Image (tube, rainbow, N blue to C red):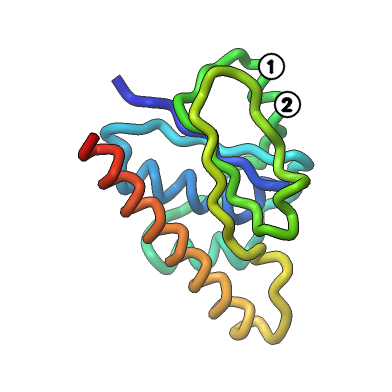
Amino acid sequence: MKSNVLFICVHNSARSQMAEAWLNQICGDSFAAESAGLEPGTLNPLVVEAMQEVGIDISNKETRAVFDVFKSGKLFGHVITVCDETSAERCPIFPGVTKRLHWSFRDPSALIGTHEEKMAGVREIRDEIREKIEVWCAEIRSL
């Protein structure tokens, strides 16, 4: 049976969406990933573009509120916050009996510069998230 994993960040517009997509692609046989945010925003178009470059389409994904996920009563084996350290205090705590992890990734919405400069930053973050998920998935599977 698959273990449910919830990725949380502030707006559910970038990091948590990428983490959800990567986990479902890399470890979808073991996990069912979802994502949510404290203050759901709109999907970051740079993140959609960066994920399309690696063959993952998240363009139709909705942003969701953590509170709505909590109210649904669904249980999660792992809740992983993916806020950066400066936003960590705003990262929500998801109640319930679950393993909580915090993985700090830079916020794509905070990147500045030209479109290409911002895309380069988003690609770095995307690849860091993929790497973290590959390592974590391998560790979990080896237990």
Q: Which residue is mark 1?
A: 71
Residue drawn at the location 65% of the way across and 22% of the way down = 95
Asked whether, in this view, residue 41 is left or right of residue 143, the answer is right
- Residue 97: assigned label: none
Q: Residue at x 57, y 62 (%)?
A: 47
Amino acid type of the residue tagged 1 in the rendering: Lys
Q: Residue at x 52, y 41 (%)?
A: 101
- Quick one: which residue is furthest to the top in this view? 73
Image quadrant in which you'd find residue 72: top right
Q: Position of residue 49 (x, y in %)?
A: 53, 66
- Circle 1 packing at 10 Å, graded few (<14), some (14-19), many (20+), is few
Q: Is residue 118 above or below residue 4?
A: below
Q: Residues within 10 Å of mark 2 (few under 14, many from 20)?
A: some
What amino acid type should be assigned to the residue bearing mark 2? Phe
Identify the residue at horizontal 54%, vertical 18% (top origin). Answer: 97
**Circles 2 and 1: CB atoms closer than 8 Å:** yes
Element on which disc 2 rests: helix
- Between the C-alphas of marks 2 and 1, the distance is 6 Å
The quarter of the image holding the C terminus is top left
Horizontal side, residue 13 vs residue 1: left or right: right
Q: Nearer the viewer, residue 121 or 57?
A: 121
Left or right of residue 80: residue 33: left
User: Is the residue 14 above or below the residue 90 in the image?
Assistant: below
Nearer to us in this view, 138 or 7: 138
Residue 22 position in % (x across, y down): 41, 50
* Residue named by callout 2: 67
Relative to 114, is 40 above or below?
A: above
Which residue occupies the foreground of this view, 60 or 30?
30
